[in-house]
């Protein structure tokens, strides 16, 4: 064994030096990575302590920017998250914004089981139970199959309610919204026509 080592001594020395060099490179990389990580964490803590820019008129983030989610925070910096919005639980039926809009859910649905074995929504909203619980009954369209044939029970295509119906929260708007429903549009058009007719009569 000693004769073999003596014959290959240069090879063994080169191998040992290569292992030592790799170990030094690994330790140096690990050390510099830790230093950079600590520096980044310190910057994040310092940035989180600064208040997010706010719109004094609206009392919330500036709504005129394109990316309302970041609230003016540069892309390379981490924004402090907003508090969780609360689900509105008023149990008051909301108007629809446009024809055929799936109605929104006016109450919390935390813990509601809706799976292949059970549908908690149908306890109140099934046509057989709606009067008892004073809940709006499920639309007749939910009892139709893909061939428009009426079924005795809810269609499997409409079974998972929160595919279309969603709760609403008290979260502020992230971007400005000037949406007008069809009734508002028609009312404005009628008002404009009436004003034009009145101006024509005066002349």
Image (cartoon, rainbow, N blue to C red):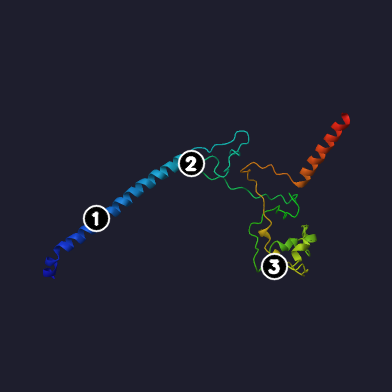
Of tags 1 and 2, which is closer to the observer? 1
Mark sitting earlier along the chain (1/3): 1
Residue where numbered disc 3 is placed: 156
Q: Are marks 1 and 2 in contact (CB under 8 Å)?
A: no
Q: Residue at x 29, y 50 (%)?
A: 28
Residue 111 percent coordinates (x, y): 63, 59
Q: How many marks?
A: 3
Compute the Cα span from label 1 to label 3: 66 Å
**Does residue 151 sit above or below 169 in this rendering?**
below
Report helix, strand or loop for mark 1.
helix
Residue in front for this viewpoint, 54 or 6: 6
The quadrant of the image that shows the C terminus is top right
Residue where numbered disc 1 is placed: 21
Residue 147 percent coordinates (x, y): 75, 68
Dot 1: few (<14), some (14–19), or many (≥20) neighbours within 10 Å? few
Q: Residue at x 74, y 46 (%)?
A: 181
Mark carried by residue 48: 2
Q: Are marks 3 and 2 in contact (CB under 8 Å)?
A: no
- Residue 158 sits in which quadrant? bottom right
- Residue 124 sits in which quadrant? bottom right
Residue 18 percent coordinates (x, y): 23, 58
Q: Residue at x 41, y 44 (%)?
A: 40
Q: Residue at x 69, y 65 (%)?
A: 157
Compute the Cα span from label 1 to label 2: 41 Å
Of tags 3 and 2, which is closer to the observer? 3
Mark sitting earlier along the chain (1/2): 1
Q: Residue furthest right?
A: 201
Residue in front for this viewpoint, 22 or 160: 22
Residue in front for this viewpoint, 164 or 125: 164
């Amino acid at each position: 064994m000693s004769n073999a080592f003596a014959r290959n001594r240069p090879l063994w020395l080169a191998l040992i030096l290569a292992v030592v060099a790799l170990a030094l490179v690994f330790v140096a990389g690990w050390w510099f990575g830790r230093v950079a990580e600590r520096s980044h964490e310190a910057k994040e803590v310092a940035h989180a302590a600064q208040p997010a820019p706010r719109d004094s008129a609206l009392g919330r983030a500036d709504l005129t920017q394109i990316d309302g989610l970041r609230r003016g925070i540069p892309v390379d910096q981490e924004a402090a998250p907003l508090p969780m919005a609360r689900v509105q639980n008023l149990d008051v039926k909301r108007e629809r914004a446009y024809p055929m809009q799936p109605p929104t859910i006016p109450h919390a649905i935390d813990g509601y089981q809706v799976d292949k074995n059970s549908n908690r929504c149908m306890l109140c909203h099934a046509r057989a139970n709606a009067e008892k619980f004073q809940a709006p009954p499920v639309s007749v369209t939910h009892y139709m199959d893909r061939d428009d044939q009426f079924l005795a029970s809810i269609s499997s295509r409409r079974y998972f309610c929160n595919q279309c119906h969603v709760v609403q929260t008290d979260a502020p708007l992230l971007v400005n919204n000037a949406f007008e429903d069809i009734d508002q549009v028609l009312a404005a058009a009628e008002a404009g026509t009436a004003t034009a007719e009145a101006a024509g009569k005066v002349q």
